[in-house]
């Protein structure tokens, strides 16, 4: 019995037919075609069961599928001289043979079929003198989509049994990825007590082909780290690991291919045998060679054979004595010393686990630095350190919790080792393994990893500082995985930008990751446990925005950030009226002489940054008006969002102000704040007496001139430090600053 099945999406009244070269299939007469059936739980799969008799030995049956519409009109799969085909063999009739033809309209160069109820496997010969080999992998390792599942593993099993007497057990699973395989290993591999384990997984099952571009590096790193963990698990049970190499995917792009080759090259450097399949089935672009695949993710029978033929069977030409020696090589003490001195200071490594231990039992401090040549030489020649960041298991205050390793294996970071210290560092690479943490974000340099619900790591492998902030959409979204709350660097809680605030929409603060570093954050408290302050500039010019920018306290713009608002009454009126007239075209006019846009309702309000080079404002202001509508609508929405969601508000205004205008502005701000605590911070070269005893008003007799700041960077930085001091005196810092999102959440 043969069950032909195909996936086809149809409309109501349509059905799929099958016609072919045998009497059972209608001898190509469309009127004699077989109607396939489907069901609600199996649609879009269509199938039919047919008995096909053998005539004169093995022969080839050719066929095609037809789609019939509700009126009985037929449409063949294609009009080319290419048919689907299978080989009929009487030996195959012990059970129903499933002929899986994939999708309607996509003809495969080689068929895929399998026995519905495969025969019970005979038990392995316990007396065999050969080796026991276990293969753990995914669907390709199971033989999908080779005829009768006789893929590369089946072919290898036949060859090794005949050639060496080895026995092969296949415990692969459809859809398996590294995390699933790590979980299955103790249950399916360890009990078999294998001599060799072939680990055969793919980047495809990690989701590389279809994940977002910014997630691809994370997928790659998780896959590589997971493979290395599986290698270690294999050696821990006394078996020799062999890695199945990466292979193509029909949906890979050029960037996917670069990552594929990158992983392939790295695997070749891991001191483990790798079955190199790219040479056999890669078309040079990361996709399958023509005629070797069944679908984007799987080789067909031809592809499987090419993969099998690429395997160097001498890898398995090992007798029991050689095997014992190989096992012994990995059962030596994991940790060995590579450097020691007369004072007892010593450094030891565990290469397989990517660990380094530094012990200083002396009364002296040591400094590991790039210029300590004797130690660096020992590290480069014997330690096997991989490039990247190494992180301390536990560390005392005052000791750097990480160091960076260069491409040549030398330590690039200066690390102080106090007296009486025993430090253990392990490669941050290990954290990327699925069982050690969850990779939230990785771009090839910056990694954000969730250790558990209360802890996360930020690892910066680059030579540049990373500025992580809410406007970085991918990072902001990635951090939604963490529970809301305040997270802090426990080793350096007072360093600026080491407080991470996470809300339901992700990151809500700015965090800095120094070059070549690892920063650990742990949950401190709920967001509601701290009082977050929103800084909202109110003019008169852009000086406040400029200083906040240099302090890195700036976020997306607010309405007065890039305007000139010399009249405090205009500011009060704009706020009271919800800013709506701020971008009203009827109230805006352009002055060619001044190169500015002026406001006719609020005469002290003007704009210098809204006209762009391609505009012709003297003749057509429409593009400018539309741009201002979009920009200022968003800026006003942020203003009100910050006002509603922060715990305290600090309104800041520069420039000369009069007492009456300030009183009016404070009254209108009080109305908008609706009981929320706020202050109006006035920064102007005036006597404090002008604003004496005004509630909610703070005045500093200082002048911040943006023109002078633009002309003199030194003055700009001086003003910034003055501003920083004022904010610190008011208790405002990166630890409690409210960061408004660029796109305010709706609803």
Image (tube, helix red, strand yellow):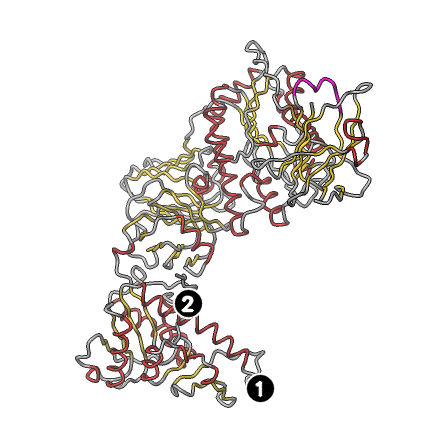
Give the quarter of the image for residue 365: top left
Residue 104 appears anywhere in the view: yes
Image mark for residue 556: 2
Give the quarter of the image for residue 505: bottom left
Q: Nearer the viewer, residue 82 or 15?
A: 15
Image mark for residue 677: none
Task: Tell me the magenta residue range.
Answer: 88-95
State the residue position of label 1.
Answer: 619
Where in the figure is residue 270, as x and y percent of width and height? Answer: 54, 35
Number of dots carrying numbers:
2
Q: Nearer the viewer, residue 712 or 619?
A: 619
- Residue appearing at x 21%, y 82% in the figure: 691
Where in the figure is residue 224, as x and y percent of width and height? Answer: 52, 39
Q: Nearer the viewer, residue 50 or 459?
A: 50
Q: Which residue lies furthest to the left in this view?
A: 693
Q: Considering the numbered disc 2 on the image, is that residue within a helix, a strand or a loop?
A: loop
- Characterize the local packing of mark 1: few (<14), some (14-19) or many (20 or more) Cα atoms within 10 angstroms: few
Compared to residue 357, the image places residue 508 above or below, namely below
Q: Considering the numbered disc 1 on the image, is that residue within a helix, a strand or a loop?
A: loop
Q: Nearer the viewer, residue 409 or 531?
A: 531
């Amino acid at each position: 019995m043969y069950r032909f099945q195909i996936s086809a999406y149809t409309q109501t009244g349509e059905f799929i037919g099958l016609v072919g070269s045998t009497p059972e299939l209608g001898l190509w007469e469309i009127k004699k075609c077989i109607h396939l059936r489907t069901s609600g739980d199996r649609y879009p799969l269509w199938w039919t069961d047919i008995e096909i008799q053998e005539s004169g030995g093995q022969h080839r049956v050719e066929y095609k599928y037809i789609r019939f519409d509700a009126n009985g009109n037929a449409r063949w799969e294609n009009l080319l001289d290419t048919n689907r085909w299978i080989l009929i063999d009487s030996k195959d009739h012990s059970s129903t043979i499933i002929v899986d033809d994939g999708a309607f309209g996509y003809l495969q160069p080689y068929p895929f079929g399998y026995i519905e109820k495969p025969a019970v496997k005979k038990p392995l010969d316990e007396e065999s003198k050969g080796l026991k080999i276990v293969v753990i992998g995914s669907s390709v390792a199971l033989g999908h989509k080779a005829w009768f599942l006789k893929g590369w593993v089946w072919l290898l099993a036949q060859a090794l049994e005949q050639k060496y007497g080895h026995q092969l057990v296949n415990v692969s699973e459809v859809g398996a990825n590294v995390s699933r395989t790590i979980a299955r290993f103790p249950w399916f591999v360890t009990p078999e007590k294998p001599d060799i384990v072939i680990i055969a997984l793919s980047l495809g099952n990690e989701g590389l082909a279809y994940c977002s571009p910014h997630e691809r590096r994370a997928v790659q790193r998780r896959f590589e780290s997971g493979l290395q963990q599986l290698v270690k698990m294999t050696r821990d049970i006394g078996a020799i690991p062999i890695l199945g190499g990466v292979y193509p995917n029909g949906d890979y792009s050029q960037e996917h291919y670069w990552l594929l080759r990158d992983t392939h090259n790295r695997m070749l450097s891991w001191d483990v045998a790798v079955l190199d399949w790219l040479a056999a089935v890669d078309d040079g672009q990361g996709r399958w060679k023509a005629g070797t695949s069944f679908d984007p993710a799987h080789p067909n029978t031809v592809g499987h054979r090419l993969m099998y033929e690429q395997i160097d069977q001498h890898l398995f030409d090992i007798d029991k004595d050689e095997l014992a020696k190989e096992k012994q090589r990995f059962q030596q003490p994991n940790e060995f010393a590579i450097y020691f001195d007369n004072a007892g200071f010593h450094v030891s490594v565990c290469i397989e686990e990517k660990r380094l231990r530094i012990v200083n039992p002396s009364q002296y401090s040591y400094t590991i630095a790039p210029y300590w040549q004797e130690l660096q030489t020992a590290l480069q020649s014997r330690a096997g350190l991989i490039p990247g960041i190494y992180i301390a298991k536990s560390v005392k205050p005052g000791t750097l919790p990480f160091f960076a390793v260069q491409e040549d294996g030398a330590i690039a970071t200066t690390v102080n080792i106090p007296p009486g210290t025993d430090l253990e560092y392990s490669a941050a690479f290990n954290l990327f393994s699925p069982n050690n943490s969850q990779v939230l974000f990785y771009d090839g340099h910056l990694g954000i990893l969730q250790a558990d619900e209360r802890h996360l790591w930020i690892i910066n492998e680059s030579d540049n500082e990373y500025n992580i902030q809410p406007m970085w959409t991918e990072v902001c979204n990635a951090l939604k995985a963490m529970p809301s709350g305040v997270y802090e660097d426990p080793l350096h809680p007072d360093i600026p930008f080491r407080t991470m605030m996470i809300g339901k929409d992700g990151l809500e603060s700015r965090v800095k990751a120094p070059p070549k570093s690892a920063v650990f954050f742990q949950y401190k408290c709920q967001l509601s446990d701290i009082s977050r302050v929103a800084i909202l500039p109110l003019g008169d010019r852009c000086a406040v925005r400029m200083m906040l920018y240099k302090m890195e306290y700036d976020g997306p713009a607010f309405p007065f950030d890039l305007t000139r608002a010399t009249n405090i009454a205009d500011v009060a009126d704009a706020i009271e009226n919800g800013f709506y007239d701020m971008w009203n075209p009827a109230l805006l006019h352009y002055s060619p002489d001044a190169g500015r846009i002026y406001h006719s309702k609020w005469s002290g309000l003007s704009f210098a940054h809204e006209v762009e080079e391609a505009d012709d404002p003297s003749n057509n202001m429409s593009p400018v008006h539309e741009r201002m509508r979009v920009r200022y609508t968003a800026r006003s929405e942020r203003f009100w969002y910050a006002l509603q969601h922060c715990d305290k508000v600090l309104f800041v205004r520069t420039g000369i102000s009069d007492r009456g205008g300030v009183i009016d502005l404070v009254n209108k701000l009080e109305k908008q704040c609706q009981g929320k605590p706020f202050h109006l911070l006035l920064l102007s070269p005036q006597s404090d007496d002008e604003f004496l005893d005004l509630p909610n008003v703070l005045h500093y007799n200082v002048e911040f001139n943006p023109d002078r700041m633009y002309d003199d960077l030194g003055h700009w930085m001086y003003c910034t430090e003055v501003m920083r001091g004022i904010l610190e005196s008011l208790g405002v810092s990166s630890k409690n600053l409210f960061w408004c999102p660029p796109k305010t959440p709706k609803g």
